[in-house]
Amino acid sequence: MSDLQTLQGARVLSRAEAESLAKRILGFSQAEAARVSINSGNRGNTRFAVNQVSTGGDNFNTSVTILSWVGRRSGSVTTNKLDDAALREAVQMSERIARLSPEDPEAMPELEPQQYAAYDGWSDATAGLDPSTRAAATREITEASRQAGLVSTGYLETQAGASAVANSKGLFAYTRQTGLAFTTTVRTEDGTGSGWAGTASHDWTRVNPGALAARAIDKAKRSQNPVAIEPGRYTVILEPTAVGNLVQLISGAVSARSAEEGRSFFSKQGGGTKVGLKVIDERVTLTSDPADPEAYASPFSGDGLPNRKTTWIENGVVRNLAYDRYWASRKGVEAVSAGGTLRMSGGTATIEELIASTQRGLLVTRFWYIRGVDPRTILYTGLTRDGTFLIENGRITRAVKNLRFNESPIFMLNNLEAMGRPERVSASESGGPGSAIVVPPIKCREFNFTSLSDAI
């Protein structure tokens, strides 16, 4: 069997296969420097609606991206044709593009070989999920909904793949990982009630479709015929997904360059950054750790820089910001990757205990359609969805119509009252696995709701 046949038949390239392919591509290079990024694997999905599977698909692909450097000029080409002729043509095209491109004043030399942490976010159970197994899992939700007289929709996406980076300086990095997200929305037949449940993980054995069904069905029933309440500032109990929807926005604001240039929340008035300053409740610590067994991420970034455990905020105090290689060289510090995963510290309270301790407030299942308002305060707007309830005298008394919020996770975490145990959530609006987010349920005061929404 030829190398080409071997590679085309491999759905997830092994380390040896990826390294062999990278060396072959770099061998065609005539550029001053070159980098090869290889992604192989498969993505499967099953979508269901009206209590039945509507679509299913599986995509298998191996693609390579070649980046060539001519001085400070660069050009890149991506292809999934892996025979020698096609790869040689792709390499030559990237070099022609590089020669035609303007110089990049922030270009950085390719990295020398690096050391990477040894861990493997791989699950055979996830990688082995085939269409029939996915359909059987969705049936646990559709049949339970049908028997309850409700209507379910949802999405199950799985990923199993390998990534590799190699360059002309001898760097080679390889990892393989799996991931999945499984979400469902269940509605009452009259369309006035809606409940959501979802989860994400790298490991299919941690997913319980029956539990997802029970949770969404219960919320759909209880959220029927919601009543309108006045917008305003409320004490809220946010379930973990709702917390993840907002807290993950902090990880998108940790750029040191933005802070030092005065363009972010982490900019200090008068110049500099807020590193060393307390910005949120002292019970909160935010970390990124690609080796977190509940939230694996790649051990390296796109250029091969190692991703390491980083504490962004410790006990409410800013400890680190992210430095890309160019900005780190300008400032004379070590480059720090943004992470690609986020864990928030928690407490011991259950959601039932958080509700019981609330005189008057709202229970929020999740947020939706979240959009930025002000990067200087990490202020966002969005809507509650699929289960919003009024709490009176320590218990849920009725479902309420959805509300629009204008709120910052920074303000929210400064108004923190209590936290539960952290758990992995599906916090992506797309329904895919997204970034790995581990957060607790929380209770906080003064959450700002600005208007009502008639959307269910």
Image (spheres, rainbow, N blue to C red):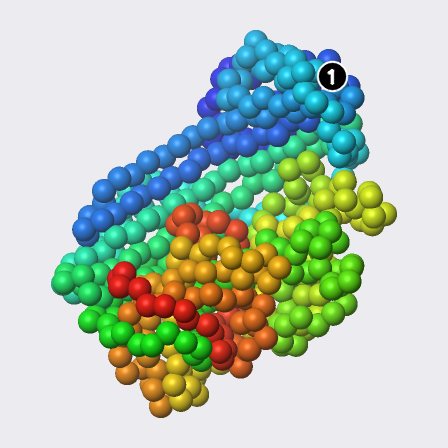
The answer to which image quadrant residue 39 occupies is top right
Q: Mark 1 points at which residue?
A: 31
Instruction: Indicate left or right for 88 with 242 as reference.
Output: right
Give the residue drawn at x 14%, y 61%.
Answer: 189
Residue 381 in percent (x, y) is at 45, 60
Residue 36 visible somewhere in the drawing: yes
Instruction: Indicate left or right for 320 with 417 as reference.
Output: right
Residue 124 in percent (x, y) is at 46, 45
Q: Decide: is 443 above or below 246.
A: below
Q: Decide: is 29 above or below 264.
A: above
Q: Quadrant of the C terminus?
A: bottom left
Category of crowding for the residue at label 1, using alpha-carbon neighbours closer than 10 angstroms: few (below 14), some (14–19), many (at least 20): many
View extreme (front): residue: 270
Instruction: Indicate left or right for 109 with 62 as reference.
Output: right
Q: What residue type is labelled 1?
A: Ala
Give the residue drawn at x 65%, y 61%.
Answer: 265
View extreme (top): residue: 85
